[in-house]
Image (tube, rainbow, N blue to C red):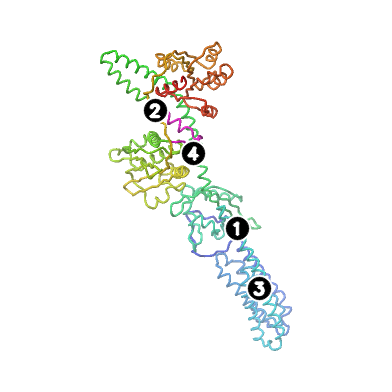
């Protein structure tokens, strides 16, 4: 079996622009017509000796035409000059056939020639090749030629009626061909337009790769996908250059393997357009063979699946964020418990030191107080980090809420601090603006991405020479902005127009996916905001996110003022918590003002209620091993329903949908661990009131 004429990418030669090459189907058509031509000439060689002596025949001319026609027919069949020929060369063969046919009629009786049918056969093949207009032109040519032959042989005066009848039939056949072929052509053109529209909607282009000529034929949609200029034909060289460098070798290896094994194939690959755009294509192909099994052509389709790839990447990113969120939620919960009793014990120590100062304790306690203040500051910082982690760890929570911009930006800066610190100083400039309506976790994601990008635009090791300036201000009435300006490398004008496009990135391979800014734009747009950028190469970039602020709202201060009225004294407080150290520290904090009892889990608390114990306030952990706070709340509905209204739930973070739904109930009070004393006092005062 003959080897497959595959051309490797490096050896692919470009074809001339605007050159129309016959496809595999057209090649096969020319081969069939070449065989028909040989059969016609062979029939003439066989039959002519029996009729060469008839009146009006010219044997010398006839044999000459037969010999020349045989050489011509065999040459076309053997050497296939149409293999790389254009439509003009194919038309030249039609003209040659016309000349041979008319000469043969002149040699075999002229107007009386029984081979008049050869003109009809030639006319039929012309319409099969070129369509209605070529058939009409051929009919006119044969009519004029037939009249000329009759005139040259002196038969026109005596055979005028016969010639007129035959010419009329030639013209009628040409006209009939025009009507029939034109109608079929119009239907075919409509179907082709419909197919083209369907391809455009589905973003699927079709292609044909001739293994004999190593040439390509593309549909209009595939030309649009590859951004091929008008008037330029597709070539292997152009296609090879368009393949993404990382996918090029694998693509040709896969296709060549499929052709060698005589099987269909499908594979995904990227293309890199002249303007730097990356597109993902899904390619399918099948091998067409002749009757002998020789590969002729590979035909197939290529679908632009860039949008699908972007969605898959977003889903993968969401899945990763969900995994990170689950881990972060668990870490936050584990940190919360020890942090809660550390913070509570620090509060107890602070109270004791304050009492000692009031009694005139020595000044040596001053150093202890300074150390205590530092410890409380560290505890507060950890508390804010844990709170941010819990917020960021709930990507499934898509609830819009009133969000202070400064809080979101500060938490994003903490997340990105490792990337920023080695490159630039972080400068904050915050104006007093109202909160915005947003999903806090997703808005945090936007600012983390912008801050990390700003850091990556600056070389490491230059924090003294560079800065990242974050500014919050009022853009206009009812809108606030966050501006992140860096002194990095900047973005070129060519790239500036495309930085929000999916999969566009200027970072090295493996560092960036090209999705970050596209996702940021999507999030900001969903919040009815806008994101813009200004940049200059060598002078840095400025990203500006503008969002609508909350109108007519009263934002409750997250830290209630501690200067409330003195809380009622000697009320009974029950602490239900399985973390013994935390429960003990909370007891120490409250025991000066209240009578405090403890229960290590919900079951033991329920036993106290069963024994007739009643409390003014019940501080109950939400999640406990033997009986959760939610289960205790349900059990009290039958035992002592009035005590349920006395419950304040303490949570380190609701980790499942059931717990979040429970805490969202209007009749359920809850506080986040670690507790802040002003909030705790406010909750107790609210219950005992």
Q: Is residue 488 above or below residue 111?
A: above
Residue 218 locus on image (x, y percent): 55, 58
Q: Say whether disc 4 or disc 3 marks the residue closer to the N-terminus.
A: 3
Q: What is the CA distance from the residue labelled 2 to the residue labelled 1?
A: 65 Å
Q: What is the CA distance from the residue labelled 4 to the residue labelled 1?
A: 36 Å
385 falls in the magenta region: yes
How would you rate the neighbour count of disc 2 (Cα within 10 Å): few for under 14, some for 14-19, many for 20 or more? Answer: few
The residue at the far left in this view is 363
**Between 39 and 617, the one nearer to me in the picture:** 617
Q: What is the CA distance from the residue labelled 2 to the residue labelled 3?
A: 95 Å
Q: Say whether disc 2 or disc 3 marks the residue closer to the N-terminus.
A: 3
Residue 26 visible in this rendered orientation of the protein: yes
As helix, strand or loop, the secondary structure at mark 4 comes to: helix
Residue drawn where x is 47% and y is 37% of the image: 439
Residue 620 locus on image (x, y percent): 49, 20
Residue on which disc 4 sits: 317
Q: Nearer the viewer, mark 2 or mark 4?
A: 2
Tell me the tag on residue 195: 1
As helix, strand or loop, the secondary structure at mark 2 comes to: loop
Residue 261 locus on image (x, y percent): 60, 49
As helix, strand or loop, the secondary structure at mark 3 comes to: helix
Which span of residues is magenta-colored?
Answer: 384-402
Residue on which disc 3 sits: 123
Q: Say whether disc 2 or disc 1 marks the residue closer to the N-terminus.
A: 1
Q: Say whether disc 4 or disc 1 marks the residue closer to the N-terminus.
A: 1
């Amino acid at each position: 079996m003959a080897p497959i004429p595959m051309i490797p990418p490096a050896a692919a030669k470009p074809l001339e622009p605007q050159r129309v090459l016959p496809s595999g189907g057209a090649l096969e058509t020319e081969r069939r017509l070449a065989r028909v031509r040989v059969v016609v000439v062979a029939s003439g060689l066989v039959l002519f000796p029996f009729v060469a002596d008839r009146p009006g025949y010219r044997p010398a001319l006839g044999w000459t035409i037969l010999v020349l026609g045989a050489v011509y027919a065999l040459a076309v069949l053997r050497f296939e000059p149409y293999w790389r020929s254009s439509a003009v060369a194919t038309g030249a063969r039609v003209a040659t056939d016309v000349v041979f046919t008319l000469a043969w009629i002149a040699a075999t009786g002229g107007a009386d020639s029984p081979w008049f049918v050869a003109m009809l056969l030639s006319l039929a093949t012309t319409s099969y090749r070129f369509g209605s207009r070529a058939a009409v032109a051929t009919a006119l040519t044969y009519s004029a030629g037939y009249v000329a032959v009759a005139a040259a042989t002196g038969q026109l005066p005596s055979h005028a009626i016969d010639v007129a009848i035959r010419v009329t039939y030639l013209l009628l056949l040409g006209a009939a061909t025009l009507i029939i072929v034109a109608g079929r052509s119009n239907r075919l053109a409509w179907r082709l337009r419909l197919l083209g529209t369907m391809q455009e909607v589905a973003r699927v282009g079709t292609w044909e790769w001739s293994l004999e000529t190593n040439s390509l034929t593309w549909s209009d949609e595939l030309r649009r996908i590859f951004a091929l200029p008008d008037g330029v034909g597709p070539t292997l060289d152009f296609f090879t250059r368009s393949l993404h460098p990382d996918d090029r070798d694998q693509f040709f290896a896969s296709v060549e393997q499929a052709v060698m094994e005589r099987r269909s194939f499908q594979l995904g690959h990227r293309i890199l357009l002249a303007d730097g755009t990356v597109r993902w294509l899904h390619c399918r192909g099948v091998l067409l063979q002749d009757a002998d099994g020789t590969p002729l052509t590979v035909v197939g389709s290529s679908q632009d699946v860039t949008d699908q790839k972007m969605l898959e990447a977003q889903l993968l990113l969401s899945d990763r964020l969900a995994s990170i969120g689950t881990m972060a939620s668990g870490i936050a919960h584990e940190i919360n418990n020890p942090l809660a009793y550390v913070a509570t014990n620090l509060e107890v120590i602070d109270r004791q030191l304050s009492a000692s100062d009031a009694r005139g304790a020595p000044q040596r306690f001053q150093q202890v107080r300074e150390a205590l203040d530092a410890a409380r500051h560290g505890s507060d910082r950890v508390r804010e980090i844990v709170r941010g982690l819990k917020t960021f760890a709930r990507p499934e929570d898509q609830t819009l809420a009133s969000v202070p911009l400064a809080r979101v930006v500060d938490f994003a800066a903490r997340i990105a601090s490792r990337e920023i610190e080695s490159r630039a100083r972080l400068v904050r400039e915050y104006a007093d603006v109202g909160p915005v309506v947003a999903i806090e976790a997703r808005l945090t994601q936007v600012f983390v991405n912008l801050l990390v990008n700003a850091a990556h635009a600056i070389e490491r090791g230059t924090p003294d020479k560079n800065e990242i300036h974050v500014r919050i201000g009022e853009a206009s009435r009812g809108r606030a902005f966050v501006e992140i300006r860096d002194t990095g490398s900047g973005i070129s004008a060519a790239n500036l127009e495309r930085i929000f496009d999916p999969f566009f990135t200027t970072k090295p391979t493996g560092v960036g996916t090209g999705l970050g800014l596209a996702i940021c734009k999507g999030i900001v747009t969903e919040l009815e905001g806008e994101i813009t950028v200004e940049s200059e190469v060598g002078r840095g970039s400025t990203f500006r996110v503008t969002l609508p602020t909350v109108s007519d709202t009263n934002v409750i201060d997250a830290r209630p003022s501690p200067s409330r009225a003195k809380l009622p004294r000697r009320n009974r407080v029950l602490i239900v918590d399985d973390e013994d150290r935390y429960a003990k520290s909370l007891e120490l904090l409250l025991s000066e003002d209240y009578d405090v009892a403890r229960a290590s889990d919900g079951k033991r608390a329920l036993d106290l209620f069963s024994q007739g114990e009643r409390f003014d306030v019940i501080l109950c952990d939400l999640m406990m091993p033997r009986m959760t706070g939610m289960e205790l709340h349900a059990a009290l509905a039958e035992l002592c329903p009035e005590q349920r209204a006395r419950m304040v739930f303490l949570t380190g973070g609701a980790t499942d949908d059931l717990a979040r739904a429970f805490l969202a109930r209007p009749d359920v009070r809850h506080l986040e661990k670690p507790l802040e004393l002003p909030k705790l006092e406010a909750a107790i005062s609210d219950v005992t009131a």
